[in-house]
Image: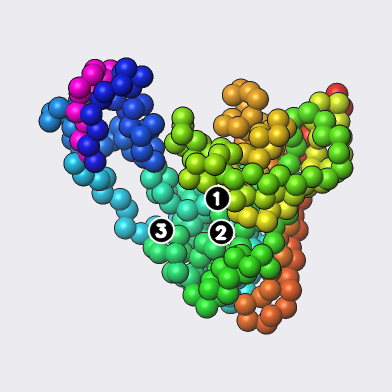
């Protein structure tokens, strides 16, 4: 990839420019510059270099990545397990699978320590992973222990027979009891690490919600997704001006606690890939969620 600076709006730091222009994370870009995989006017540059008109940037290589995830001992909250599937209650703060910047300490690393039986349909960095939830979202996630189970669960995810229900605490009082948000989601053109409601390079996204409880300055809601876009609930609630509380990316305030956004995957239902039995699992919100919720209840 090559870029030539021709617009005064692009006279910013080299790393910030590349974050804006690519899908590469800041940490990865900085490492690539350090390893001379990104050149400025044919020479090594610094992350902090402020671009000038007519500067030429060239990406000449990629970082070598881990070829497979490694097992790591981890305390997993296993709600259910048999020869085909596992249902895990993922804590807030735990990344689901290895990726740039997170090759260790993920749920997958813990799963590999727990069992050698995981599907490989999604490759060596995502064994067993049929779907994912955000790092700072807590709650239920299903894991496939063989390829046949993975194939059937993925098909259910596609045809909506695998369903997930979330609970969230959002800013402000929502006056109507139910609602549906039908708004396409795509990459934010101003910040490639974020998603937004947009008509540009977007996909359909539909979120249904109903009010559980109203407080003075917040509303507790239950949500069900028709689609499963990246950050869908967080983006959609921000779009209607009721962002998820404690969300550092899409919320009203960047000052948040370490717990993460008040979003919890509380229920999952699917057809068992071998028995064809409908199975439903539920889990309560974590204690940190409950503690923050009580503050809003008592206002």
Q: Residue furthest front?
A: 199
- Spatial separation of the CA atoms under disc 1 and disc 2: 18 Å
Q: Residue at x 59, y 65 (%)?
A: 158
Q: Is residue 279 left or right of residue 294?
A: left
- For mark 3, give the secondary structure: loop
- Spatial separation of the CA atoms under disc 2 and disc 3: 13 Å
Q: Residue at x 52, y 78 (%)?
A: 148
Q: Residue at x 68, y 73 (%)?
A: 271
Location of the N terminus (image quadrant): top left
Report how many numbered discs are placed on residues in the image: 3
In the rendering, which numbered label is found on residue 58? none
Instruction: Tell me: residue 164, above or below residue 189.
Output: below
Front: mark 2 or 3: 2
Q: Give the residue pinned by disc 3.
A: 125
Q: Quadrant of residue 247?
A: top right
Instruction: Tell me: residue 138, above or below residue 51.
Output: below
Specify whether residue 285 is in view: no
> Which label's residue is closer to the chain start, 2 or 3?
3
Graded by Cα atoms within 10 Å as few (under 14), some (14 to 19) or many (20 or more), the crowding at tag 3 reads some
Q: Tell me whether circle 2 and circle 3 mark residues in contact (CB < 8 Å).
A: no
Q: Give the residue pinned by disc 2.
A: 131
- For mark 2, give the secondary structure: loop
Specify whether residue 175 is in view: yes
- For mark 1, give the secondary structure: loop
Q: Is residue 53 left or right of residue 176?
A: left
User: The magenta stretch spans which residues?
Assistant: 46-59
In the rendering, which numbered label is found on residue 203? 1
Residue 273, position in %: x, y? Answer: 62, 77
How has the structure been colored for display?
rainbow
């Amino acid at each position: 990839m090559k870029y030539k600076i021709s617009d005064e709006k692009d006279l910013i730091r080299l790393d910030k420019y590349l974050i804006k222009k690519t899908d590469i994370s800041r940490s990865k870009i900085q490492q690539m510059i350090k390893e001379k995989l990104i050149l400025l006017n044919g020479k090594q540059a610094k992350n902090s270099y402020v671009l000038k008109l007519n500067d030429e940037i060239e990406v000449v290589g990629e970082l070598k990545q881990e070829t497979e995830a490694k097992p790591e001992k981890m305390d997993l909250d296993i709600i259910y397990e048999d020869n085909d599937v596992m249902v895990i209650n993922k804590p807030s703060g735990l990344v689901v699978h290895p990726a740039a910047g997170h090759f260790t300490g993920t749920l997958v690393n813990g799963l590999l320590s727990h069992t050698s039986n995981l599907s490989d349909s999604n490759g060596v960095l995502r064994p067993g992973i049929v779907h994912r939830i955000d790092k700072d979202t807590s709650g239920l996630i299903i894991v496939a222990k063989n390829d046949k189970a993975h194939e059937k669960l993925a098909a259910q995810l596609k045809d909506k027979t695998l369903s997930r229900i979330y609970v969230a605490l959002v800013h402000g009082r929502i006056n109507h009891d139910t609602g549906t948000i039908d708004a396409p989601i795509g990459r934010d053109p101003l910040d490639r690490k974020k998603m937004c409601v947009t008509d540009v390079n977007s996909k359909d996204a539909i979120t249904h919600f109903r009010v559980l409880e109203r407080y003075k300055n917040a509303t507790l809601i239950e949500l069900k997704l028709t689609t499963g876009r990246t950050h869908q609930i967080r983006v959609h609630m921000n779009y209607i001006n009721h962002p998820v509380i404690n969300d550092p990316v899409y919320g009203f305030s960047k000052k948040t606690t370490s717990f993460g956004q008040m979003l919890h995957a509380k229920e999952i239902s699917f057809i068992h890939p071998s028995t064809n039995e409908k199975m439903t699992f539920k889990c309560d919100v974590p204690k940190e969620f409950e503690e923050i919720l009580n503050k809003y209840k008592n206002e």
